[in-house]
Amino acid sequence: IGWIAPAFGAELTQPADPSITTDLGAHVNYVSEADSGHRTRATRGKPSQSEAAPVEIAPSRPLTPPAPQVSSLSYSSLALYERCGYRFYVERILGLPPTPGAAPQQPEPTQTTLPATDRGTLAHQILQDLDLRRPQIPPDQPKEITPLIQAFISSEVRARLTAATELRREQRFVFPLGPALITGTFDVLATEPDGTTLVVDYKTDRLNGRSPAEMVAREYEAQRLIYALAALRAGAPRVEVVHLFLEDTVRPVSRSFESAELMSLQEELDRRAAPLLAGRFEVTGEPQRAICTGCPALGGLCSWPPEMAMRAAVDRLF
C-alpha cells in the first residue's frame, strides 16, 4: 500500500476524517484495526445526521485468480521457472522485459569480446552451414569466433558426425505435455551406423574456469531431459545427447538413453513441470545475483529486498 497509495494522491497518515477524496479524484476510506471486521457503506457528500449501524459481513473465501494457461514450453523457459517461479511469471506471463545488465556469469563485453548473444548467434550460423567433410571457416570472422569453429573442426564429435548415415541440422520438434506443448530445436540430429540417434548441442558459453560437466549440471539438465524425450518419442531405440562446449571440445558432456527409459523420463518431466502447469509461481527461496540479475520484479514487485537479491551467493550477505 505504501507503493500504491501515492499513485492515487493519498497521504499515508490517517486524516481526521476517515473518508476523503484525493486531489486526483480517488475516494479513500481509512479502516482502523478495530473496524477491520466490518464493512460500512461509503458516503459521498454531506454525511447524514445519524450514523448508520455497521453491517456485519460474513468472511468470504479469498478470490483466487485462474491460473494462467501456459500453452508452450521450451527447455529455457522450464529452466527459468525452476530458478525462480515468480521471475518466470513476470517475464513470460506478464510480458515484462528483463532490465538491462550483463548476466552475472558472463563478463562485460569489451572492445575485443562479443556480447554473449552475438557470439552464440554467429557461431551457430557458421556451424549450421559448415561442410563437415571439407570444413572451411568463412573469412573475415571476428577473432573470437575463429578459434571456436577451429576447435569444433578438430574435435572427435565432428568425426562422428561425418560418419553418420543420416544428418539433419536445426531440426525442430514438438510433443505434448499435459495442456501444453514442449517445443525445441536440435542443433544436430544424426543417425550413427549402429542405429544410435546422436543429438549434438553446441554451447558458446564462456566457461571462466568451470568444467563443461559442471555447466551442464547447473544449467542444462532440463534441456538434456527434453532432448532425450523428443528423440525417444520419435522412435529412436537409443539416444545419446552431447553438449559440446566450443571453448573445451576435448571434454564433451554425453549421456545415453534407451527406449526402455521413456516412461521414467516422461514422469520426471511431468514432475518438474507440474507446479508450473498448475499455476504456482513462487519466488525463489535462494535469491542471489545469478538468479536475480536483470529481473524486472527486482526492487518493486519482488518480496526479496535488493540487498538479498544482489548477494554473490546464498551463504554471503554481499
Image (cartoon, grey):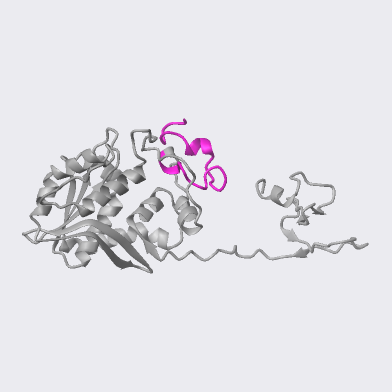
Question: Is 299 covered by the magenta stretch?
Answer: yes
- The percent position of residue 118, horizontal first and vertical second, equals 34, 45
Secondary structure character of the magenta stretch overall: loop
Q: Residue placed farthest to the left in the image?
A: 194
Q: Is residue 13 visible?
A: yes
- The percent position of residue 50, horizontal first and vertical second, equals 91, 62
Question: Is 269 covered by the magenta stretch?
Answer: no
Residue 151 appears in which quarter of the rendering? top left
Q: Is residue 168 left or right of residue 107?
A: left
Q: Is residue 32 left or right of residue 1?
A: right
Q: Is residue 308 left or right of residue 194?
A: right
Residue located 74% across and 45% down the image = 12
Q: Count of labels shown?
A: 0
User: In the image, which residues are magenta?
Assistant: 290-318
Residue 42 appears in which quarter of the rendering? bottom right
- The percent position of residue 114, horizontal first and vertical second, equals 34, 39
Q: Is residue 305 left or right of residue 137?
A: right
Residue located 11% across and 59% down the image = 196
Q: Is residue 264 visible?
A: no
Residue located 47% across and 48% down the image = 98
Residue located 27% across and 51% down the image = 125
144 w.r.t. 14: above or below? above
- The percent position of residue 155, horizontal first and vertical second, equals 13, 43
Q: Residue placed farthest to the right in the image?
A: 49
95 w.r.t. 153: above or below? below
Residue 256 appears in which quarter of the rendering? bottom left
Pick the front one: 290 or 58: 290
